[in-house]
Image (spheres, rainbow, N blue to C red):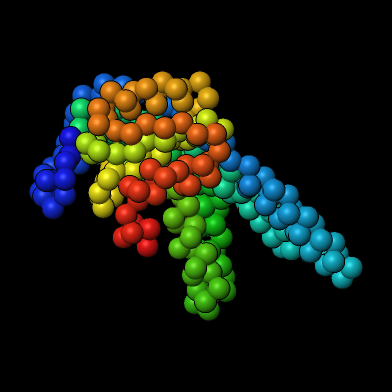
Amino acid sequence: MLTHKDIDNTDKIETMRMDLYNEEVLYEYETIEHQYLGYFVALLCSLFIFWMSYDSSHDGLDVGEIIIYVGGGLLLNLVFIFFASADIKRIYKFTKNGILTEQADVVPEYAYQCIRMIGRVGVVVCLVAVVFVGPMAFVGAGASALLSFKLVNFRLKAMMFETLYFDESVIIKSSKINYITIVPNAQLLLSLDGIFCNKKNANDIFNTLRDFYPNGHFYEVEEEDDIYSHYKYKEFLHPMDQD
């Protein structure tokens, strides 16, 4: 547990932060945040590609243009639907000194396989273009080749976040959106956190936080905006943090 005496003790803070990965997990919660924007973008992209192909069809479409429109459209829609709109899974692991959060997009394995397959095809196309067109092909295909080689091993990695307990913190839960914010009474970013909850575990997480913040100030509000307008939130959010 960090106190005001530890604010400038960077060695202690760094040691505690690294120890989070090896400490015993006392409580663990998994939450899912649903995303929908990518579906809307994919629809707009499909309509745009359809309009482009229709406009070009007046002069006739060759095989290359069809491949570009169809292949490009499928690739973009795949990215928008499965990656831009991927659900976000977070696993909150409560230890004696802090919370370790693991965050990753929920993307089906076949989506990665499709991306990697497109990458392999792109590599082959770029190499064939160099053979038949010559070095000038690198002008247009160079960037495509680099991207294709990256796509071959494409895979998203989970992100890790650390939150150390600070003895005096304000913890506010919004029941409308099942969100909990933690703000320490110090300019200490390692103790500033926001916890996204599912409806079924919001109360459990909120009550678990009570065990780890014995000197914390706990409040429940309705809307998300009520969090940021709460007098205690403003009191603990220091001017430097607001900048």
Q: Which residue sits at x=53%, y=25%?
A: 199
Residue 14 vertical position relative to residue 213 in the rendered view, above or below = below
Q: Which residue sits at x=16%, y=49%?
A: 7
Tell me the quarter of the picture where residue 238 sits. bottom left
Q: Which residue sits at x=25%, y=38%?
A: 168
Nearer-the-camera pick, 10 or 74 = 10
Q: Which residue sits at x=25%, y=49%?
A: 186
Residue 143 at x, y percent in the picture: 49, 68
Q: Can residue 63 be spotted in the picture?
A: no
Q: Quadrant of the C terminus?
A: bottom left
Q: Can residue 190 be spotted in the picture?
A: yes
Nearer-the-camera pick, 110 or 100 = 100
Q: Quadrant of the N terminus?
A: top left
Residue 39 at x, y percent in the picture: 67, 45
Residue 57 at x, y percent in the picture: 86, 64
User: Is residue 57 shown left or right of residue 79?
Assistant: right
For this orientation, the residue located farthest to the bottom is 136
User: Is residue 14 shown left or right of residue 198?
Assistant: left
For this orientation, the residue located farthest to the right is 58
Residue 210 vertical position relative to residue 139 in the rendered view, above or below = above
Residue 130 vertical position relative to residue 86 in the rendered view, above or below = below
Residue 6 at x, y percent in the picture: 13, 46
Nearer-the-camera pick, 116 or 84 = 84
Residue 169 vertical position relative to residue 57 in the rendered view, above or below = above
